[in-house]
Image (cartoon, rainbow, N blue to C red):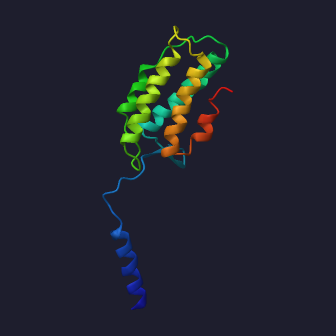
Amino acid sequence: MLKQLGYIFIIGLMFSCNSSEKTEQKVTIVDGSKHYDVYQGSEMANLMRGMHAFNLQLKKEVENGKITTEFPEEFLKIHTAEFSESKSRNARFDHYSGKFVEAQKLVFVEDTIVPLTERYNNAINLCISCHQTECTGPIPKIKKLLIN
């Protein structure tokens, strides 16, 4: 009898979980007899990874004093990209993302008295400021983009 109550309790716990919650998006890759569950990042996470890669290359250009690239229009997707299931767009994010786009565009403006390194660091510092409010994990990686 006690064993049956235990089973009922466990089944009750399983059904009490909110089944309307979304699960992480994973893709199963089959390689011969091995199965791999690979995490698929959200549209926003993938965009930010791309922003990091771009700014890593841009940092080298700024350090050399010559920018050979243009502002990537892809960055404008920051205003519409889907977040992961545990995050959502809010006024603070909208504020920082708007300021970031403005600052990132200024990096590519040639006729300004603000030094290139300062304009670049301003854009990166906006990333850090936003990430200090939510999603703090990438901050150490973002700080490596700064030019000292």
**Residue found farthest to the right:** 148
Q: Residue furthest front?
A: 113
Above or below 94: residue 30: below
Q: Looking at the image, which residue sits at the far left? A: 20
**How many marks on residues?**
0
Q: Position of residue 26 (x, y in %)?
A: 44, 46
Say if 126 sits above or below 31 in the image. Answer: above
Residue 116, x across and y down, in percent: 59, 16
63 lies above or below 83: above
Classify residue 114 as left or right of residue 26. Answer: right
> Residue 72's spot in the image, x, y percent?
46, 19
- Quarter of the image for residue 93 reads top left
Give the position of the N terminus as an image quadrant: bottom left
Viewer-closest of 44 and 62: 62
Q: Residue shown at 62%/20% (left/top)?
A: 117
Quadrant (top left, top right, bottom left, bottom right) of the C terminus: top right
Image quadrant of residue 101? top left
| x and y, in percent, of residue 57 in the image | 60, 21
Residue occupying image coordinates x 62% and y 29%: 145
